[in-house]
Amino acid sequence: MPQRKQLNRRDFLHRSLAAGIGVPLIAARSDSLQSQEVTINADSPRIKEYRTLGRTGFKVSDISSGGPQNEVLLKALLQSGVNYIDTAESYGRGQSETSTGNVVKEFDRKKLFVTTKIVVKADQTKETILARVRKCLERLQTDYVDCLMIHSPATSDLLVHEGFHEAAKQLKSEGRVRFLGVANHGGQWNDVPETMEQVLGKAAEDGRFDVFLMVYNFVQKEMGEAVLKVCQEKNIGVTLMKTNPVGGYLEMKAQVDQLEKEGKPINDYLRNLLPRLKEKADKAQAFIDRYGLQGEAQVRDAAIRFVLAHPGVHAACISFNIFDDLKTYVGLSGSRFTLKDKQMITQYRSQCSDLYCRHACGICEHACPAGVPVNTIMRFNHYFQAQKRERFAMEQYRELTSPKADGCLDCPGGCESACPFGVPVQGLLAMAHRRLSLA
């Protein structure tokens, strides 16, 4: 096999920029797989480790599937040993549940753990929630879900929603729901914002929730570790999202270059940001040189091994989009976090962590005079860029009822001043708006 060429900064950084520049080229990627046949053979990676999901007692695959919509790929994942599937009523307007149901019915249902999520609002009744969950079951083509989660509650008040718990009690008695859970990103714009730690801490105290889906990665550790400690004490099952904080290098510079090519005016903020971006690029180059990286995949793999090394973590929920993702992520099952991994991510955290706008954070939101939901928009941007769920991300952004990020470049930038991590929030928001709205 010919030796691979050492990756230079331009090549390494360019990989995370493609989504921002080439939207039309990638929008239909996952749809194209639907007509293909995927065969799992003896050489294909398989799940090597299963962990007991807290007090549910169910042994789930350490690498699990989040938000599946492609049936061929999901079938291949289940054939490889993945047995935890996370979906939601809102994913693809129910299409994710439909796709999951079409595949799950071909497998032994008792060997799978299927979770779905519903958004709960204060004015909803028991009857409304019962009807919605039954629609979820219809789309999933199953008699029951293993876990029904409250989807992204903005405040802990929703955790004690009377209608939800009355409906859940009835559904449990009917054998339609086995366990309850909470999925939380934290930091959503509202009158009394609460962090992920606050919401999930209250959920743990409540005692009625058995499984959490939460954010935790090697850059954003502290809040997640506080929640994980409580979960271990109360034997709550933990599945993770947003486990990989790597990506987005030189994104703004690439888009500024694109604006120049298009002959569009460039805001003074972006021009003034370029020297700071060069400094960040130099940090990234030092990181690449130190570890002789062939690509960001090595850091991504270390990021997954890092979260799975925590004894309180039971599964990493991955958004699988193409067949190569199966080989990449399932191949990490059962692997161990090494000393080299630790050295690499420690170096990355110290040199490059200001390139990552933290999920479940929202610290800067109070400083925005327009009420822009920073954390929510950057989450949509993550769906687009990192998870390649371009259409879903753009739909979510289009339907956002709060102020969008179209005016961020002409703002004094209170969000950026309020960020304790040095993230260029204002520029990231402006670029996210351009990507998510095709402006």
Image (cartoon, rainbow, N blue to C red):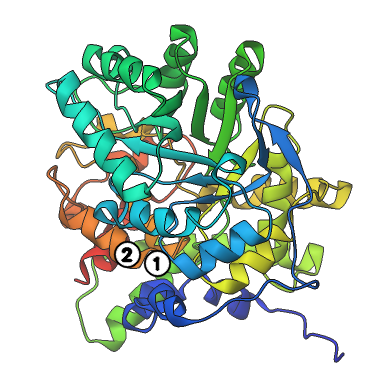
- Point 24% across, 53% down: residue: 93
Q: Are marks 1 and 2 in contact (CB under 8 Å)?
A: yes
- Mark 1 to mark 2 CA distance (whole Å): 8 Å
| Residue at the extreme bottom | 2
Q: Is residue 368 above or below residue 272?
A: above
Q: In front here: 285 or 78?
A: 78
Tally the marks. 2
Q: Position of residue 323 (x, y in %)?
A: 58, 73
Q: Is residue 372 above or below residue 128?
A: below
Mark 1 is surrounded, within 10 Å at the Cα level, by few (under 14), some (14 to 19) or many (20 or more) other residues, namely: many
Q: Let me know if residue 269 appears in the view.
A: no
Q: Let me know if residue 61 appears in the view.
A: yes
Number of the label disc, if any, that sits on residue 270: 2
Label 1, on which residue? 252
Q: Along the horizontal axis of the image, is 162 left or right of 389?
A: left
Q: Position of residue 15 (x, y in %)?
A: 54, 75
Q: Along the horizontal axis of the image, is 95 left or right of 172?
A: left
- Point 81% across, 51% down: residue: 335
| Element type at mark 2 | helix
Q: In front here: 314 or 180?
A: 180
Q: Position of residue 362 (x, y in %)?
A: 36, 34
* Callout 2 amino acid: Leu
Q: Position of residue 234 (x, y in %)?
A: 61, 12
